[in-house]
């Protein structure tokens, strides 16, 4: 009877040890699963941040510092669209990974961002997105506005159209012109709050043709604004 009691105690101890081992293994597995989940989450966040950074610099996939364009980026249809395809073909032959729609989304984001930066006098943002020559022109206008004590405010309502009107490649330098038609609210006030220009309660339609440039031989995918002009169609209508 003493031997049986001893054997029973040993067996019981082994069962307890087995249960404890199972508990440890279960906790380790749970910890490993949790670690895997956190790793997956961190990997997803890193990938999402990378996509945002690429969109900032006009990659094959554009707002940002760029933000997504307000409203839908609309391209022309029919003959105009066919002409645009032929125009962009010049860039595509020199830069096979070029995608017009992705470029237009980036250009539209840049258009809105540059307008807001100009209104706020945000030179730092402008230097990232503009060529040195255009930056200098914008800085001069902003300095003059500040000298007069005038503050400008722009509310972007919607982007009605973003259409490639011209494209050219000279050596490794590519230039693409885009016609933007947008609706916005623009008003300028003096330091005392008096209205100087514009109307804070009226939506106006603007048309601009902006030209972006990029050195295709460089790994940096960023396009910079190198020229601005008013849309001849809206100038004629006014």
Image (cartoon, rainbow, N blue to C red):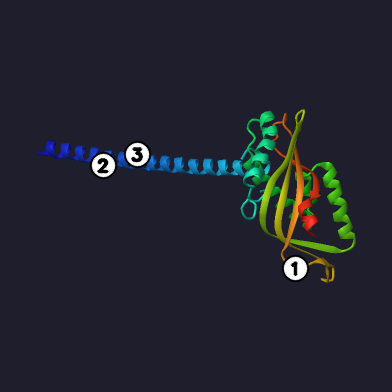
Q: Is residue 120 left or right of residue 219?
A: right
User: Is residue 190 positioned above or below 67 on the image?
Assistant: below
Mark 3 or mark 1: which comes first in sequence? 3
Q: Position of residue 228 (x, y in %)?
A: 80, 47
Give x and y (percent) for residue 137: 86, 48
Sequence-earlier tag: 2 or 3:
2
What secondary structure is found at the residue carrying circle 2? helix
Q: Residue at x 72, y 31 (%)?
A: 216
The furthest residue to the front: 79
User: Which numbered marker is on residue 127?
Assistant: none
- Asked if labels 2 and 1 touch by Cβ distance under 8 angstroms, the answer is no
Q: What is the CA distance from the residue labelled 3 to the residue labelled 1?
A: 67 Å
In the figure, is residue 200 to the left or right of 82?
right
SS class of the residue under badge 1? loop
Which residue matches tag 1?
A: 200
Front: mark 2 or 3: 3
User: Secondary structure beneath disc 3?
Assistant: helix
User: In the image, what residue occupies the spot 89% across and 62% down?
Assistant: 148
Foreground residue among 75 and 3: 75
- The residue beneath circle 3 is 25
Say which quadrant the C terminus sits in.
bottom right
Q: Give x and y (percent) for residue 13.
A: 24, 40
Q: Label 2, on which residue?
A: 16
Q: Earlier in the sequence, mark 1 or mark 2?
A: 2
Number of disc labels: 3
| Residue 171 point in image, percent of width and height | 77, 28
């Amino acid at each position: 009877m003493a031997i049986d009691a001893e054997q029973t105690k040993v067996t019981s101890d082994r069962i307890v040890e087995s249960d404890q081992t199972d508990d440890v293994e279960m906790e380790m597995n749970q910890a490993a699963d949790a670690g895997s989940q956190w790793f997956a989450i961190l990997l997803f966040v890193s990938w999402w941040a990378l996509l945002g950074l690429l969109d900032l610099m006009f990659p094959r996939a554009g707002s940002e510092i760029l933000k997504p364009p307000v409203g839908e980026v609309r391209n022309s249809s029919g003959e105009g669209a066919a002409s645009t395809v032929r125009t962009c073909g010049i860039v595509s032959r020199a830069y096979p990974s070029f995608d017009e729609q992705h470029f237009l989304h980036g250009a539209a984001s840049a258009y809105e961002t540059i307008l807001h930066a100009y209104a706020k006098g945000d030179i730092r943002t402008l230097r990232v997105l503009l060529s040195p020559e255009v930056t200098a022109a914008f800085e001069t206008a902003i300095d003059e506005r500040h000298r007069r004590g005038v503050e400008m405010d722009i509310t972007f309502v919607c982007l009605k159209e973003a259409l490639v009107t011209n494209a050219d490649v000279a050596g490794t330098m590519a230039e693409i012109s885009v016609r933007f038609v947008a609706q916005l609210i623009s008003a300028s006030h003096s330091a005392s709050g008096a209205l100087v220009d514009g109307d804070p309660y009226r939506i106006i339609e603007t048309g601009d043709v902006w030209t972006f440039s990029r050195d295709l031989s460089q790994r940096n995918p960023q396009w910079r604004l190198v020229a601005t002009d008013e849309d001849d169609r809206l100038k004629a209508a006014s």
